[in-house]
Structure formats: C-alpha cells, structure tokens
Amino acid sequence: MSSDLALEHEAMIDVLHDPVKLGVNLRAARKSVGLIQEEAGLRLGMARTTIIAIEQGTRHVRVEELQEMAKLYECDFSLFFIAPEPPAEPELSARKRVLKRVFLRDPDTTMTAMLM
C-alpha cells in the first residue's frame, strides 16, 4: 500500500471511530444540498433533534441511516468517512494584519494604536 493510500485509509478509520468527525461530514453534506436540519429530518423520518445529535456526534448513526442520508444528500456513502478539512482561519483586515506585524515587534506601541 502506498504511503498516500495508507494515510487516506488511516484517516477513514479515524472518522469511523470518531462520531464528531462523522457528524462534521454529515453536516457538510446536508448543507451542500441546501437542506436545513428540520427538512432533512422530515425526509429521513427523523426528528430535527435527532439530526442535531447525529451531527454533533452524540447519537450513534446506523448504516441504514447513513445510506438514506447519502441518497438524500446526493453523495457517495464513502464521502462521510473522509477526514474533514480543518476550518479555515478568517481573513484578517489590512489594518489588523499591520497591527499584528507591529505587535510582534513592539507590543506596547500596538496596544496604544489599537485604542486610537
């Protein structure tokens, strides 16, 4: 097994054993088709609170439920088991980028500039 394939396999195993990561993927899949939790729940025959619990990783999800979600979310079942991307850091404004650079050089001056 190549090293890239081995890493991908390891990441999938990690998601299988981490309901929070699985929930992150399920939430992303639901949002990708423009469904809110309530509508997804109605179509899947689940309460909105059940969808919330599954997406938060506090409720176990059965294979049959994952298969139904894959159909509803128009995606391949295996996509639920890919390690989720870490959240992107928000873009800093130009002023904040400058203040950050200055702060690293001189914290006292930066604090004064921030208060102005």
Image (tube, grey):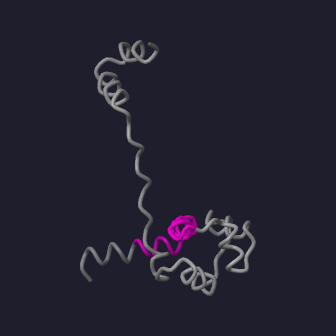
Look at 64% across and 77% down and name the residue there: 61
Q: Say whether residue 12 is magenta.
A: yes
Judging depth in this view, the residue of 59 and 94 nearest the camera is 94
Q: Residue at x 49, y 71 (%)?
A: 15
Residue 98 placement: quadrant: top left
Q: Residue furthest left?
A: 2
Q: Quadrant of the N terminus?
A: bottom left
> At 46% across and 14% down in the image, what residue appears?
115
Q: Main secondary structure of the magenta part?
A: helix
In the displayed image of the protein, which residue is found farthest to the front? 34
* Coordinates of residue 96 in the picture (x, y in percent): 37, 29
Query: What is the quadrant of the C terminus in the image?
Result: top left
Q: Which residues are magenta?
A: 11-34
> On the rendered structure, is 50 left or right of 15?
right
Count of numbered labels shown in the rendering: 0
Q: Quadrant of residue 36?
A: bottom right
Residue 28: within the magenta?
Answer: yes
Residue 29 is left or right of residue 48, and the answer is left
> Of residues 116 and 84, which is closer to you in this image?
116
Q: Where does the image place residue 59, in percent across and percent down from the top left?
A: 68, 70
Task: Please give left or right for residue 42 compared with residue 57 in the image.
Answer: right
> Looking at the image, which is closer to me, 69 or 32?
32
Q: Position of residue 45 (x, y in %)?
A: 73, 80
Residue 14 x/y as whole percent: 46, 71
